[in-house]
Image (cartoon, rainbow, N blue to C red):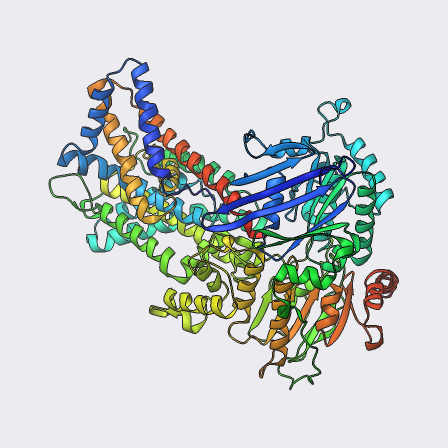
């Protein structure tokens, strides 16, 4: 194991960490060698993020050994002072799933934070940053917007900025937590190429991801975590997508993908026209309309408008009037940022279930319906926990105590309650593992075939998801929606429309209207 | 959200008393004597409890509720002081003009006027916040000074007592004053009113739909808007005005229950102490009853501590300030561990 030529950049053994009664990690093992791309995969709640937090110095484990670059940083007889600063100094660079950017500062200012250059004195080292960013862009094709404030950037743009921020520091051990989830297909390729190149320079690259095809394309070795334990450590060549997925789930039967059925769209029950910056869209009950697009092309505004939520266009958005939208009464919305827009972390599950359903007749009580019937809400929550298989200690647990996948189950459970006439789901499987994504897909699929099926709009940056589930497929480019003909509904066909085709289309539209 | 852990209040009070004791000892005071005087001044007799501690707690309780209500919704209303003055002036004016009417008419009219005036004093910051996004901390704070000086000018001008000698108004007519709650003491019925309002507010937060939505807007504004479909602008406006109204009520209750006339500088900074009262109570209306009485006791006891042990009254402010610091320390511990607990959620 400890051959001199393959030096372990990171070696973790017997790692254990609990949060109260929840065991997040239990005997986790991981060895990442210099010069390799190492993939860490596992279900939501398998302990991936906890493991990374330990590596980054955010969390102290309860037991186990951690070695970074040959030196023990935690373990028997070692000092307990492994901090985020130590992690930096040892060359551990981490791209987090949750962004650590200052919204009010520009991209350039954010990148300059924490960078110390002798010559810049008290000023921000912006020249240095700009030069480095140009070089990174030239090497990797990673585009970032340096001049705009971060709060004006889309999630995809913010994540690119996060990656660049870590690359600025030239880390020896680069850790990326779900980096590809929000990138456009061409950018994913660029990133994977970049990861290979960085590993080729002798760095260790640890990639946490849930999309197995990407992982298998880029990784040299793979570690699979399940329920906080390492269940598989293998060379890429020794595994198949199936064997990795089985190791993750621990159950081969759960894997078979939902069959696409050819159910005719049911009777038209909800029908309306929406116009958002040149959008004409007619939705039918019992039909899934997929909208694919690269982050930041107006799908967010469109989704919110369709869901009847506020239509305020952000900076760089359309800014136009929402136009005529005729919405049915019961609209369900699964927002993309479930932690911020879907749930309140400090509220318990029953309180979160009450959100948006506080006006339901069966939960209102007292004079004038001014009171909430918490008994009814708790009963409803318990039922959801049961039917949707939410793993939690009970309806009084806070939403923040749930893993990402279980949070999404809770949001889906709440939104589908009360037979909605329209369901708008925005990147509903982002950050979810195989089982979690399958759960969401199953729900959408079942819903579509239900007796009183709603119209379903699936807005997603994940092309595979859109193609697999949708009856009709649209692409959205700069706020313009175009339907993809049946013949072009392939990964390549739609991907091309999402990127190049949009440019000409948008330009032509500009000539036509202005 | 500045919400301490459950042990925060006890930690804060313990810290305040410990630090104060050490400082007093270093200053050469007789600490046991001073603390003894503090205790006796606050709780040593029926008079101490009712006429001093509880009576002083009334404006703190009402303004504390005002602050707790606003903070729960994420509105940083620092203007309870100014809103209190507005309510005091309006309540006094109505009581003075309508003094010939029976108490059953004039008292409710006074209280209603103070609610409206307090809300009106909060209206400008509300509009500025919701229309232009102006930070309410600044607008409410600055309006405090406007209210204080405007009140002083009114007392020196249009509302001055008939002889035009003293810097005060004429006294309120008998029918426009609050009755006694605890016979033989100075405790007026305003205390019962304040406690009742605390219970009502607690019920609102805990059991009603609007209370739930207020908490949602405060804890997760995005989720409340998007998942909860709450019109957060309207809700925030309502909460802001209601907070101002409660603080305004404190002014009228104090004038009608204690001062019985309008004086410049009628509040001893209660609108600011209210922030400490609310935070120490972790923004829980029922707990505000206890923390308001605690601060009332410190102020009542401080007077006796000065008389008996020669400790300057300013030490009361020190105790209050350290209590707030203690609450903030406990809240800091909470947000840190909150980050910890957040780790597995994304795993």
Vertical position of residue B240 compared to residue A435: above or below: above
Q: Position of residue B160 (x, y in %)?
A: 31, 35
Image quadrant assignment for residue A338: bottom right
Quadrant housing the C terminus of chain A = bottom right
Q: Position of residue A466 (x, y in %)?
A: 73, 68
Q: Position of residue A52 (x, y in %)?
A: 63, 44
In the displayed image of the protein, which residue is found farthest to the left? B184
Residue A255 visible here: yes
Residue drawn at (19%, 41%), measured in percent from left and top?
B187
Q: Position of residue A174 (x, y in %)?
A: 72, 41
Residue A321 visible here: no
Vertical position of residue A453 compared to residue B156: above or below: below
Vertical position of residue A25 compared to residue B81: above or below: below
Foreground pick, A24 / B76: A24
Tell me how many marks there are. 0
Foreground pick, B21 / A185: A185
> Relative to residue B98, is residue A134 drawn left or right?
right
Residue drawn at (22%, 21%), measured in percent from left and top?
B32
Residue drawn at (74%, 73%), measured in percent from left and top?
A280
> Relative to residue B309, is residue B12 drawn left or right?
right
Vertical position of residue A109 compared to residue A449: above or below: above
Quadrant housing the N terminus of chain A = top right
Foreground pick, A47 / A89: A47
Foreground pick, B240 / B294: B294
> Relative to residue A409, is residue B16 drawn left or right?
left
Image quadrant assignment for residue A121: top right
Image quadrant assignment for residue A367: bottom left
> Relative to residue B311, is residue B335 drawn left or right?
right
């Amino acid at each position: 194991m400890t051959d001199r030529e393959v030096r372990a950049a990171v070696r973790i053994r017997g790692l254990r960490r609990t949060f109260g009664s929840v065991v997040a990690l239990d005997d986790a093992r991981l060895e990442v060698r210099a010069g390799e791309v190492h993939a860490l995969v596992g279900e939501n709640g398998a302990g991936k993020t906890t493991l990374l937090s330990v590596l980054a110095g955010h969390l102290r484990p309860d037991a186990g050994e951690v070695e970074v670059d040959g030196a023990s940083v935690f373990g028997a007889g070692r000092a307990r002072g492994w901090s985020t600063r130590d992690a930096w100094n040892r060359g551990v660079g981490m791209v987090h799933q949750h962004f650590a950017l200052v919204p009010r500062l520009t991209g350039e200012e954010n990148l300059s934070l924490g960078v110390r250059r002798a010559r810049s004195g008290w000023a921000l080292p912006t020249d240095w940053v700009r030069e480095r960013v140009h070089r990174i862009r030239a090497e990797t094709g990673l585009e970032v917007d340096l001049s705009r404030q971060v709060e004006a950037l889309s999630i995809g743009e913010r994540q690119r900025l996060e990656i660049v921020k870590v690359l600025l520091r030239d880390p020896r051990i680069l850790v990326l937590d779900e980096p590809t989830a929000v990138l456009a297909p061409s950018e994913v390729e660029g990133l994977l190429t970049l990861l290979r190149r960085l590993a080729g320079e002798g760095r260790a690259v640890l990639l946490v991801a849930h999309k197995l095809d990407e992982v298998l394309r880029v990784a040299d070795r793979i570690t699979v975590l399940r329920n906080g334990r390492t269940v598989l450590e293998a060379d890429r060549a020794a595994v198949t997508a199936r064997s990795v997925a089985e190791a993750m789930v621990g159950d081969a039967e759960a894997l078979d993908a939902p069959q696409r059925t050819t159910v005719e769209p049911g009777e038209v029950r909800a029908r309306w026209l929406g116009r958002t910056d040149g959008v004409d869209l007619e939705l039918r009950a019992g039909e899934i309309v997929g909208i694919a697009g690269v982050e930041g092309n107006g799908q967010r505004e469109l989704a919110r408008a369709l869901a009847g939520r506020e239509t305020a266009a952000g900076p760089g958005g359309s800014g136009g009037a929402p136009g005529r939208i005729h919405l049915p009464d019961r609209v369900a919305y699964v927002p993309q940022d479930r932690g911020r827009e879907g749930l309140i972390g400090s509220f318990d599950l029953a309180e979160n279930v009450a959100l948006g359903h506080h006006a339901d007749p069966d939960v209102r009580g007292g004079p004038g319906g001014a009171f909430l019937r918490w008994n009814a809400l708790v009963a409803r929550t318990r039922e959801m926990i049961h039917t949707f298989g939410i793993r939690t200690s009970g309806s009084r647990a806070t939403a923040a105590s749930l893993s990402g996948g279980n949070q999404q189950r809770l949001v889906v459970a709440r939104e589908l309650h009360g037979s909605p006439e329209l369901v708008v789901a925005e990147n509903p499987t982002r950050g979810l593992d195989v089982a979690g994504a399958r759960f969401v897909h199953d729900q959408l699929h079942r819903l579509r075939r239900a007796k009183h099926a709603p119209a379903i709009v699936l807005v997603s940056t994940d092309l595979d998801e859109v193609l697999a589930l949708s009856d009709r497929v649209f692409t959205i480019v700069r706020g313009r929606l175009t339907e993809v003909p049946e013949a072009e509904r392939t990964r390549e066909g739609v991907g091309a429309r999402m990127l190049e085709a949009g440019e000409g289309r948008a330009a032509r539209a500009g000539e036509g209207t202005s | 959200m500045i919400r301490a852990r459950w042990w925060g209040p006890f930690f804060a009070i313990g810290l305040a008393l410990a630090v104060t004791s050490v400082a007093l000892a270093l200053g050469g005071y007789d600490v046991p004597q001073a603390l003894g005087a503090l205790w006796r001044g606050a709780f040593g007799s029926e008079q101490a409890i009712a006429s001093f501690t509880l009576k002083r707690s009334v404006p703190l309780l009402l303004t504390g509720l005002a602050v707790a209500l606003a903070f729960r919704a994420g509105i940083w209303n620092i203007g309870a002081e100014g809103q209190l003055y507005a309510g005091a002036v309006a309540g006094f004016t109505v009581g003075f003009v309508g003094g010939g009417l029976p108490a059953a008419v004039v008292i409710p009219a006074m209280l209603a006027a103070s609610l409206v005036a307090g809300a009106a004093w909060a209206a400008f910051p509300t509009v500025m916040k919701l229309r232009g996004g102006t930070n309410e901390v600044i607008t409410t704070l600055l309006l405090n000074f406007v209210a204080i000086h405007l009140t002083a000018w009114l007392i020196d001008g249009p509302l001055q007592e008939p002889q035009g000698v003293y810097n005060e108004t004429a006294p309120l007519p008998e029918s426009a004053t609050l009755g006694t709650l605890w016979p033989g003491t100075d405790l007026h019925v305003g205390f019962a009113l304040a406690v009742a309002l605390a219970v009502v507010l607690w019920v609102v937060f805990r059991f009603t739909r609007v209370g739930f939505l207020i908490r949602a807007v405060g804890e997760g504004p995005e989720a409340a808007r998007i998942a909860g479909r709450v019109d957060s602008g309207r809700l925030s406006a309502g909460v802001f005005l209601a907070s101002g109204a409660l603080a305004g009520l404190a002014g009228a209750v104090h004038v009608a229950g204690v001062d019985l006339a309008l004086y410049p500088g009628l509040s001893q900074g209660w609108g600011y102490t209210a922030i400490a009262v609310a935070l120490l109570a972790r923004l829980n209306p029922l707990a505000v009853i206890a923390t308001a009485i605690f601060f009332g006791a410190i102020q009542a006891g401080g007077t006796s501590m000065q008389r008996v042990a020669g400790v300057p009254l300013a030490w009361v402010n020190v105790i209050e300030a350290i209590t707030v610091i203690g609450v903030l320390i406990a809240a800091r511990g909470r947000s840190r561990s909150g980050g910890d607990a957040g780790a597995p959620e994304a795993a």
